[in-house]
Amino acid sequence: MFPAIFTFLVLFTAVCAAGVIVCRNTVNAAMCLLLCLVGVAGLFVCLEAYLLAFLLLLVYAGAVVTLFLFIVMLIDVRGGAPRARNPLATVAGIIAAALVVGGLASFWVRGHLAAPAASATPALGASLKAYAYPLFTAYLLPVQVLGFLLLVAMIGVVVLSRKPDPGPKP
Amino acid sequence: MSLFFQLPVVIQMALKGLAVICVIFPIAGACSMAERKVCAWIQDRPGPNRAIPPWFAWMPIVGPALQKLGAFQLIADGLKFLFKENQVPGHVNRFYFVAAPFLAMIPALSTVTVVPFGAYIDPSGHTVPLILANLDVGILAVFAVASLGIYSMILAGWSSNSKYSFLGGVRASAQLISYELSLTLAVIPVFLWINAPGREGTLGLGRAVEFQSQPGFWGGSWFIFIMPVSALVFLIALFAETNRLPFDTIESEADLVGGFHTEYGAFKWGLFFVAEYLNMIIGSAVFVLLFFGGWNPLPWVPLSAVAGWFGLAGHPVVLGFVSVCIFLAKVLFMIFFFMWVRWTVPRFRYDQVMRIGWRILLPLAIANLLVYAIGIALIQH
């Protein structure tokens, strides 16, 4: 039964991912993104990576897509008629698509990873410690650098979105 | 019992799911009834006391007593929701309008599976929690799946194509995300404390209860005594997350008519209502497990002590039943507390809700986390 569920989830995720870019209505696209993330979380559960599945739901499905919807609704209540296509954007899109296809193709041709030994994978997915310990030891620097990057982005948003000071009130 | 485990896995899962619906749905319905009765008592009026089917009216004493308690009003209301015309207004986005109430039910019903609701003692003397899906990531799963409930409010508000609904939906997305931060930060000290060095790390809710059932003064005291600030922050954030007064700005009938569900009626409106109570029940259950000792009857009196007094250790079914009753009693008290607050404290204005969330609750939660992180590091080092 589980292979069938896995196959279903793979197809579901792929269809939803396609929906994100095909849908002209921005709210529909955001909802497709949400379903796509739920599908990926389901795939993680099938692979017994429960922590990753729930983190994905918590951070992306629960918070990030909510903010997408929030902004889409604030900018355009009706969900938005799309703007006319810019020819430059079409060229950029084609190049980006070619890069993605090329990357996937190279992975398909020679990117096969050796499967880890069955004895190395624990029965019900890795324990929390297996995730947490490397994060705070071996990967401490990347984690801190990423955190710093996010902080810089946040400060940038605050600076950009501040209204200019109207000067002292008379 | 063994017959159940011989069934195919799919049927076992289906039966478990059915059990969740059959147990939780009536509790949520009863809560909606209790809310009306509690609010009536607080406002010094009788509350619903008329509805009664004829065959109960023929009973001499029991019938009128149940009528006075308003026990049949629940059935009357439920049937009314089912048989009313299930109309969809002409100006709405039909697909999302119909989908939103069902979206509200999915997270509410699926979080129940990772919440333990009782325990029994196995022959080797270990206390084993009763739970549908015993996951390592317990509390994270509750937070993750519960955070999806917000989409029902946003979509309901957006698809209704009405100003009031839309404002409710926008408020929902801002308020729920704001308070999720405090909610998550408030439970971190608990899990820092229970994941002591040398133990297998877990975020399971059963472990939190296990830690509150140890012998000794510090071992047996509930976390509400050890971490009162965490409990307070968690409770306040829970009120905001479950959209209850005084943080009821999403519905806010004074300025938004009905908020995100202004355009809804009949059964679809009823689903929103049930989902709100389901979220309250699950939030209360998590609060009881983390801070009120779960299925332990009193502070410093664990379940195993009770089992010892009455000789119940050898009867897992009886002990399981007792523990579920203790746990449910606490959860129902918490729900009563929710109602008590609702009919006592007036609603905050929307800007006040945001100010409380970002300027008071979040700094308090961060300071609390820092103090406890340093303290726990010093004690457990």
Image (spheres, rainbow, N blue to C red):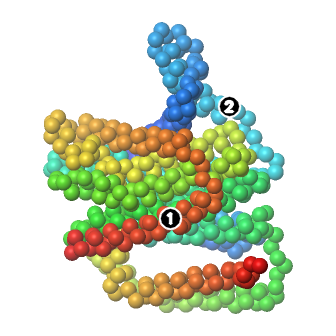
B363 up-or-down from B240: above or below: below
Front residue of A39/A164: it is: A164
To which chain does the residue with label 2 belong? Answer: B
Residue found 15% across the figure and 40% down from its top: B308
Residue that appears at 63% across and 61% down: B351
Which mark's residue is nearer the viewer, 1 or 2? 1
Residue A70 can be seen, yes or no: yes
Which mark is first along the chain, 2 or 1?
2
Which residue occupies the extreme front position in the image? Answer: A170
Task: Tell me the element at label 2.
Answer: helix
**In this view of the protein, can residue A9 be seen by the observer?**
no
**How far across and how far down the image is residue B19, in percent?**
44, 41
Give percent across and percent down for residue A68: 65, 70
On screen, residue B154 above or below A147: above
> What's under tag 2, amino acid-wise?
Phe
Relative to B152, B301 lies left or right: left
Question: Which label was assigned to residue B83?
Answer: 2
State the residue at coordinates (73%, 35%): B85
Relative to B6, is B75 above or below? Answer: above
For residue B360, which numbered disc appears in the image?
A: 1
Res B47 → quadrant: top right
The disc labelled 1 sits on which kind of residue? Ile
Point out residue B177 in the picture as x, y percentages from the top left corner.
56, 64
Q: Is residue B56 left or right of residue B114?
A: right
Q: Residue at x 25, y 47 (%)?
A: B299
> Is A12 placed left or right of B122 in the picture?
right
Q: Residue furthest right?
A: A84
Question: What is the quadrant of the C terminus of chain B in the image?
Answer: bottom left
- Helix, strand or loop for disc 1: helix
- Where residue A150 appears, as percent x and y from the top left, is 53, 83
